């Protein structure tokens, strides 16, 4: 039986490494995380499952957070983040990378935003844009931490 050459082993290793890198970049599989500091200690949200995805940044950071509510009261979560209901959902919200991120508005989805949230950089501070999907008992949050 013929053994594979070193060249084929290196090529196969590079392909596997690339596939793992791309899948992690796209949020597959989703890995349950600890809450970001902004979400820690929300009353009534002790059982919430957090799935965080960093959009990067140097001084200013952006994150996407999927919150699986697991029976937690969404009103308490939204109130703790100081979000107000809004009708306008930025088109950019639907274009986010993780495969589990919603791609369009469906019935049973409500949008909320921090005062001063901007799709551009905006002022210094911590800002949130959230969509509550009642049918899946989840909140999807776009976090902008501007320094």
Image (cartoon, rainbow, N blue to C red):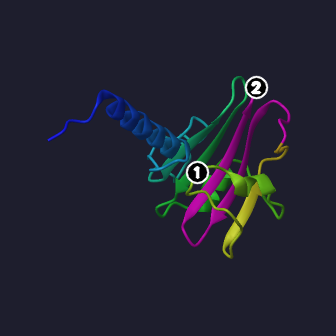
Q: Is residue 76 above or below residue 2?
A: below
Taking the magenta stretch, the answer to whether it contains residue 96 is no
Vertical placement of residue 108 versus 80, above or below: below
Q: Which residue is mark 1?
A: 98
Q: Residue at horizontal 54%, vertical 68%?
A: 136
Specify start and end residues of the magenta stretch as a single range: 120-147
Mark 2 residue element: loop
Q: Which mark is residue 128?
A: none
Q: Is residue 9 visible?
A: yes
Callout 1 touching callout 2 (CB < 8 Å) = no
Left or right of 115 on screen, residue 126: left
Between 112 and 14, the one nearer to me in the picture = 14
User: Is 109 drawn above or below residue 25 in the view shown?
Assistant: below
Q: Position of residue 67 (x, y in %)?
A: 55, 54
Which is the main secondary structure of the residues drawn in magenta? strand
Q: Is 135 colored magenta in this rendering?
A: yes
Q: Nearer the viewer, mark 1 or mark 2?
A: 1
x then y, percent, for residue 93 = 73, 54
Residue 147, disc: 2
Measuring from the top left, give residue 112's x and y in whole percent. 75, 57
Q: Quadrant of residue 110?
A: bottom right
Q: Element at badge 1?
A: loop
Q: Earlier in the sequence, mark 1 or mark 2?
A: 1
**Which residue is situated farthest in the top direction here?**
59
* CA gap, disc 1 and disc 2: 25 Å
Q: Is residue 84 visible?
A: no
Q: Residue furthest front?
A: 2
Can you say which quadrant of the picture contains the N terminus? top left
**Left of 9 or right of it: where is 135?**
right
């Amino acid at each position: 039986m013929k053994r594979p050459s070193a060249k084929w082993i290196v090529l196969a290793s590079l392909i596997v490494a690339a596939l793992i890198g791309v899948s992690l970049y796209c949020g597959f599989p989703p890995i349950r995380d600890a809450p970001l500091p902004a979400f820690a200690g929300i009353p009534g949200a002790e059982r919430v499952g957090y799935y965080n995805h960093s959009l990067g940044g140097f001084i200013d950071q952006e994150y996407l957070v999927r919150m699986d509510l697991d029976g937690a009261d969404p009103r308490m979560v939204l109130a703790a983040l100081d979000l107000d209901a809004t009708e306008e959902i930025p088109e950019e919200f639907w274009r986010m990378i993780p495969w589990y991120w919603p791609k369009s508005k469906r019935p049973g989805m409500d949008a909320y935003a921090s005062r001063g949230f901007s799709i551009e950089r905006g002022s210094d501070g911590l800002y949130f844009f959230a969509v509550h999907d009642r049918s899946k008992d989840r909140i999807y949050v776009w976090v902008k931490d501007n320094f």
